[in-house]
Amino acid sequence: MKKMWSIKQINLIPWIMFLLFQFETLNGFNIINRNEWRARDHLYSESITEDVRYVIIHHSYNPGFCQTTDACKASMRSIQDLHMDFNGWEDIGYTFAIGGDGNVYEGRGYGIVGAHAPNYNNRSIGLLFIGDYTHSLPTPYMLNVAKEFIAYSVSQKQLKSDYKLYGHRQVRETECPGQALYNEIKNWEHWTEN
């Protein structure tokens, strides 16, 4: 006689948790929110009122590459301190950041005017790669996470599907996002020469 398993005999909790985790990381990245990296409160924020049609790619230069989640969280706090205390801005300038740990870090977040690219702050996502990418590229994993995050932003209706991708140097006189990273993004879909 075939034995039937009852619900009481099968502990479903681990399986349910496993399936929930799979859905949460389906995109291949995790978003670390502001509370998780212990961001300071913003002094002021303004909502974006027009379509977001641009992604502007940046590198931090300093702080450099971060490999662990704790180090990347510290880098985010360091960048926020620089932007608020030295630059006098209301918050960290970028919309999101990519860490060497493969996580996406929420900066100002979706729908909030940034402070990363004059004339584009109110209609773009400022996507930062933490580290200096003047002579070397971010890891392949970081590059893939960035592409997946951009696609995710389109799927969530936070970015128009016909968006244009620029390196920071295309919209302001700067070396950012570093020569190596700039050469790389010129091969990405949606990169546009202005």
Image: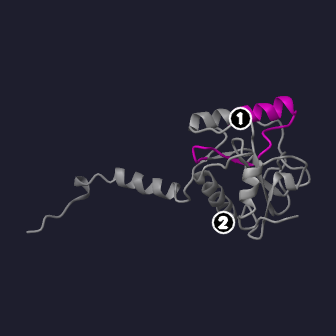
Element type where label 1 sits in the image? loop
The picture places residue 9, in percent across and down from the top left corner, at 22, 53
> In the image, what residue type sits under mark 2?
Ser
Quadrant, the C terminus: bottom right
Dividing the picture into quadrants, the one containing residue 27 is: bottom right
Residue 87 covered by magenta stretch: yes
Q: Which mark is residue 142?
A: none
> In the image, what residue type sits under mark 1?
Pro
Q: How is the image coloured?
A: one colour
Q: Which mark is residue 155?
A: 2
Q: Is residue 61 above or below residue 17?
A: above
In the image, what residue occupies the spot 58% across and 34% down?
A: 70
- How crowded pointer 2 is (Cα within 10 Å; few <14, some 14-19, many 20+) is rated as few
Q: Is 191 left, or right, of 130 in this rendering? A: right
Residue 168 covered by magenta stretch: no
The picture places residue 44, in percent across and down from the top left corner, at 84, 39
Measured Cα–Cα span from mark 2 to mark 1: 31 Å
Quadrant, the N terminus: bottom left
Dividing the picture into quadrants, the one containing residue 158 is: bottom right
In the image, what residue occupies the spot 68% across and 46% down?
A: 106
Q: Is residue 68 above or below residue 119?
A: above
The picture places residue 97, in percent across and down from the top left corner, at 69, 46
- How crowded pointer 1 is (Cα within 10 Å; few <14, some 14-19, many 20+) is rated as some
Extent of the magenta region:
76-103
In the image, what residue occupies the spot 68% across and 60% down?
A: 150
Depth check, front residue: 49 or 116? 116
Q: Which mark is residue 63?
A: 1
The picture places residue 102, in percent across and down from the top left corner, at 58, 48
Q: Is 134 left, or right, of 18 in this rendering? A: right
Task: Tell me, yes or no, if residue 37 can be seen here.
Answer: no
The furthest residue to the bottom: 162
The furthest residue to the left: 1
